[in-house]
Image (spheres, grey):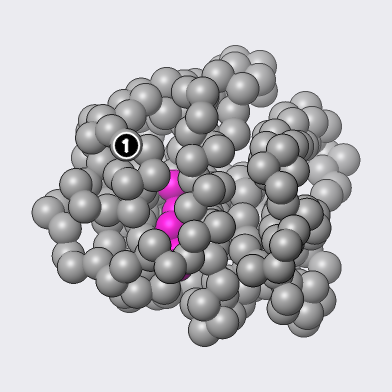
Amino acid sequence: MSQQPTLAVVEATRFRSHDPAYHDYVQLLVGNVIAEARSHGWRVDRLAADRGTEALLAATETADAIVIVGGEDIHPGFYGAETGYPNESRHLPVADAAQIALVRAAIERRTPLLGICRGLQVVNVALGGTLVQDLGEECGHVNRGVPIPQVLTTHTVDVASGSRVADLLGEPTVEVRSAHHQAVDMVGADLVVTARSHDGHIEAVEHRDAPVLAVQWHPEDVAAPAGQLAALLAGLRAPSAFRSLAPLPA
């Protein structure tokens, strides 16, 4: 990497005039990622995927690492399902296509990539995986019927021994902050499940041999355990530490 490595922080869109409260909170979370990265010596390029695939791939071609952050549901057409499911958000298919292409390009380019929340789901769908479209009203992964800043909830995640995420976080069980109503269903090609929640849902995946790690939770939330985001970002600066993974226990 260069003396000051470049981190591409990729969000789905910069505009949500239809839902300013949600947009403001997303911007807070994205801002936390950017601030943490800059404090550790990254030069950050903030990019919006709804500019389209060609623009996003060009803008990230020389990035030293990539973070795909949270946002709206992926359009179900990208994983062979239908719209009309409970708690469905609006869809941004241009952004979906661009981020899916970015994941595939990052694997080909061997560019380290961290996915957060939606970012994990993009990684899974990009590699042929599918999603549970809604976890139900009492799923314990999101608070419903509250103001947007209160939608995140706290729960524990069991991390697989020998995984990259275990190496970075240093604990077999970690407390996380979540706000998701969807989850990985069928796991994408060459991905290994490396963390699960208390109810068995997949909370982290890693590529078998490319420097790609994604978590379903929000390490960038202000109430997340101290140092969690910094640890995951630090993993992007040491791609040589990404070793080939054997299948881990379910």
Question: How many labels, in total?
Answer: 1
199 on left or right of 93? left
* 213 inside magenta stretch: yes
Q: Magenta segment, which residues?
A: 211-215
Q: Is residue 225 above or below residue 231?
A: above
* 156 inside magenta stretch: no
* Percent position of residue 185, x then y: 31, 57
Name the one closer to the observer, 132 or 95: 95
* Percent position of residue 21, x then y: 77, 27
Q: Amino acid at mark 1?
A: Gly
Residue at position x 54%, y 37% from top? Answer: 229
| Residue at the disc numbered 1 | 170
* Percent position of residue 80, x then y: 43, 71
The answer to which image quadrant residue 222 occupies is: top right
Residue at position x 32%, y 36% from top? Answer: 170
Q: Residue most toward the front? A: 3
* Percent position of residue 84, x then y: 52, 52
Residue at position x 39%, y 62% from top? Answer: 241
Name the one closer to the observer, 98 or 238: 238
Q: Is residue 64 above or below residue 121?
A: below
120 on left or right of 91? left
Q: Is residue 32 above or below residue 193?
A: above
Kindly state the secondary structure of the residue where label 1 is placed: loop
236 on left or right of 95? left
Please rate how many residues cluster around mark 1, counting C-alpha atoms within 10 Å: few if below 14, some from 14 to 19, many from 20.
Answer: few
Q: Give the main secondary structure of the magenta stretch.
A: strand
Task: Kindly tell me whether residue 159 is visible in this rendering.
Answer: yes
The N terminus is located in which quarter? bottom right
Residue at position x 72%, y 38% from top? Answer: 39
The answer to which image quadrant residue 189 occupies is: bottom left
Task: Kindly tell me whether residue 137 is visible in this rendering.
Answer: no
227 on left or right of 95? left
